[in-house]
Amino acid sequence: MVTTHALVGLLVALPLAVLAPDHATTILTAGVIGGIVPDLDVLATHRKTFHLPIYGTVAAGIALMFALAVPTAATFAVLAFLLAAALHNAGDIVSCGLGARPWHNRSERSVYNHYRDRWIPPRRWIRYDGAPEDLALAVGIAVPSLVVLEWRWQLLATSLLGVSVVYVGTRKRLEHVTRWAVRFLPVWARQYVPERYVTR
């Protein structure tokens, strides 16, 4: 779930925020955004355009060296962003393949490896986004943030968990709800909706 990715971003930014408490807001925000940004490619080629498993990991490694050499708010924020984005790729790899119904679809495409010019097969440790084990992971990842951070970040983590609970509860009906909702979009907007959701 994108909420799980956001909570991972919050978690990886947490120790950096503790090291630079005066800039904690910037660092934590960078982590959350880094956890979410790869999924913006849902508007292009999902899990390919902004998912960069090899190059993103290399970039995070370089950012780590810079942060160790020059520990500033900026280098910590960049590191939090890139670590969260790299872990987003890893999370998608250990999850399911692409498809609207991954519990039925046995797609062998998880994340595109631009370096080798091929798709990485999914590990399916988490059966699909929105599976109960996805929620359990999100809860476990949220605990440190709920314990350590101040109320604003606790509220964010709690809100992300709330959205996760709703998503998990509706995940297998979501495609039907989307098909129903798309009927009410103006004609010009439907051209931006994936074909599988448009009822003719």
Image: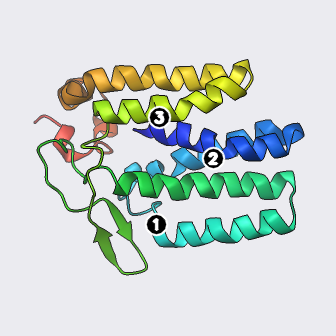
Of labels 1 and 3, earlier in sequence is 3
Residue 24 is left or right of residue 102, and the answer is right
| Image label count | 3
Q: Nearer the viewer, residue 103 or 124?
A: 124
Crowd around label 3: few <14 · some 14–19 · many ≥20 (10 Å): many
Q: Nearer the viewer, mark 2 or mark 3?
A: 2
Q: Relative to residue 2, is residue 88 depicted above or below?
A: below
Residue 91 is left or right of residue 153, and the answer is left
| Residue 8 appears anywhere in the view | yes
Render colour scheme? rainbow
Which residue is disc 2 drawn over? 12
Distance of label 1 from label 2 (alpha carbons): 17 Å
Where residue 1 is drawn, which disc sits there? none
Where residue 3 is drawn, which disc sits there? 3
Residue 135 is left or right of residue 195, and the answer is right
Q: Secondary structure at mark 3?
A: helix
Q: Secondary structure at mark 1?
A: helix
Of labels 2 and 3, earlier in sequence is 3
Crowd around label 1: few <14 · some 14–19 · many ≥20 (10 Å): many
Q: Quadrant of the C terminus?
A: top left
Q: Nearer the viewer, mark 1 or mark 2?
A: 2
Which residue is disc 1 drawn over? 53
At a point 13% along the width and 49% down the height, the residue shown is 105
Q: Relative to residue 28, is residue 178 depicted above or below?
A: above
Q: Nearer the viewer, residue 56 or 14?
A: 14
| Residue 179 appears anywhere in the view | no
